[in-house]
């Protein structure tokens, strides 16, 4: 492919999925990653050793590292971010620095370098939760008043920055729902629950487990980004979601995992007091805008859960060396 793409945060969860997806399509990619706890160079070693991608360790807040990574780049896919709500409660300054200031530096330096298109990866959390109905792109308010954590507030501010740049430069903002799939750090719900059961521990389910999340398979997000590279219109934000029918509660997700791992949910799910009662109970996005553009997400949730469980079964050495650190934030 003629396009040369810089992927920031490409050693993280969704970034890794995207890099493998695009490498399979023959794209020329450079990965810039700071390699925090959530980013693993080992994720990408097979691609690096095969000469399919170039890897550069660096911080998006370091202008010199960013400038160096942008040499010859046509397109930027900007994943790099601190991404865990619980961690943001104890270190909000880090989240602001990386997610807001880092995004500002990436935008400024990318267009100084003549980048042709910049896709910023935002989140459904910029809208906050919604009891009924679905948020459309125009429902995002300026500022972070809808967001409910230091993480989501920083992402909301970064989203505003990207949209502001999009008035004068070719910027697109993607707002995906709750991604899951291979290479997800085991601090997040699904890999935490899967790895717990594989280690003989129960699934800790908050409250009654009736919280609703829209489970979007990370390889689907990757295909969406490839689509937006070609068809996305500069200056626009796009929601992408699975929009399950019926919606999937956390309890349903946990029961599916128990079934796939062949354990009894009545014995392997432990209900614990919700540390944040009524907090972010339901997230839901309207995806008419992106479907009208021509992208329709591939939705087969149970099959995608099955593939995810299979990956964690087959890659236990990957997550076992990360499990202790991931669990430390819950103690």
Image: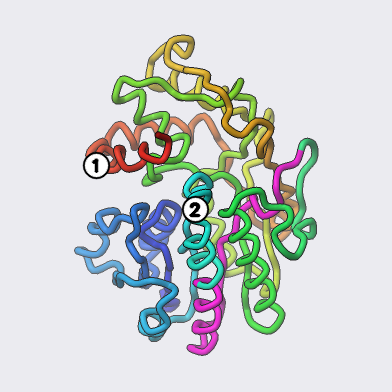
Please check the rendered image and state whether residue 113 is part of the magenta-colored stretch, yes or no.
yes
Image height of 35 relative to 269, above or below: below
**Residue displayed at 63% across by 72% down:** 162
Identify the element where label 2 is drawn. loop
In primary-sequence order, the first of circles 1 and 2 is 2
Image height of 127 relative to 248, above or below: below
Please check the rendered image and state whether residue 233 is part of the magenta-colored stretch, yes or no.
no
Q: Residue 83 carries which label?
A: 2
Identify the element where label 1 is drawn. helix
Give the extent of the magenta segment: 102-130
**Residue displayed at 57% across by 31% down:** 275
Which residue is most to the front?
A: 90
- The number of discs equals 2
Work out whether residue 92 or residue 22 is closer to the camera in this orientation and state it: 92
Quarter holding residue 326: top left
Image height of 254 relative to 317, above or below: above
Q: Name the residue under label 1.
A: 321
């Amino acid at each position: 492919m003629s396009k040369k793409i810089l992927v920031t945060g490409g050693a993280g969860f969704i970034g890794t999925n995207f890099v493998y997806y695009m490498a399979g399509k023959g794209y020329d990619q450079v990965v810039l990653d700071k390699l925090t706890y959530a980013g693993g160079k080992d994720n990408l070693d097979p691609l690096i050793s095969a000469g399919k991608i170039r890897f550069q360790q660096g911080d998006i807040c370091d202008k010199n590292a960013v400038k160096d990574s942008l040499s010859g780049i046509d397109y930027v896919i900007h994943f790099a971010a601190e991404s865990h709500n619980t961690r943001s409660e104890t270190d909000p300054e880090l989240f602001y620095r990386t997610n807001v200031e880092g995004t500002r530096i990436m935008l400024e330096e990318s267009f100084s370098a003549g980048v042709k298109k910049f896709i910023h990866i935002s989140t459904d959390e910029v809208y906050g939760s919604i009891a009924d109905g679905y948020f459309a792109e125009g429902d995002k308010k300026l500022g972070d008043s809808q967001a409910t954590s230091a993480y989501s507030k920083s992402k909301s501010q970064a989203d505003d920055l990207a949209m502001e740049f999009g008035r004068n430069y070719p910027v697109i903002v993607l707002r995906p729902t709750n991604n899951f799939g291979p290479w997800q750090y085991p601090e997040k719900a699904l890999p935490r629950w899967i790895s717990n059961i594989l280690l003989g521990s129960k699934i800790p389910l908050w409250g009654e487990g009736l919280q609703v999340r829209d489970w979007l398979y990370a390889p689907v997000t990757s295909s969406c980004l490839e689509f937006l590279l070609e068809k996305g219109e500069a200056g626009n934000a796009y929601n992408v979601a699975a929009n399950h029918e019926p919606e999937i509660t956390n309890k349903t997700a946990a029961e599916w995992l128990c079934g796939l791992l062949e354990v009894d949910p009545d014995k392997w799910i432990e209900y614990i007091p919700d540390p944040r009662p009524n907090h972010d109970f339901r997230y839901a996005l309207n995806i008419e805008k992106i479907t009208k553009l021509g992208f329709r997400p591939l939705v087969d949730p149970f099959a995608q859960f099955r593939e995810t469980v299979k990956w964690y079964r087959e890659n236990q050495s990957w997550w076992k060396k990360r499990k202790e650190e991931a669990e430390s934030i819950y103690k």
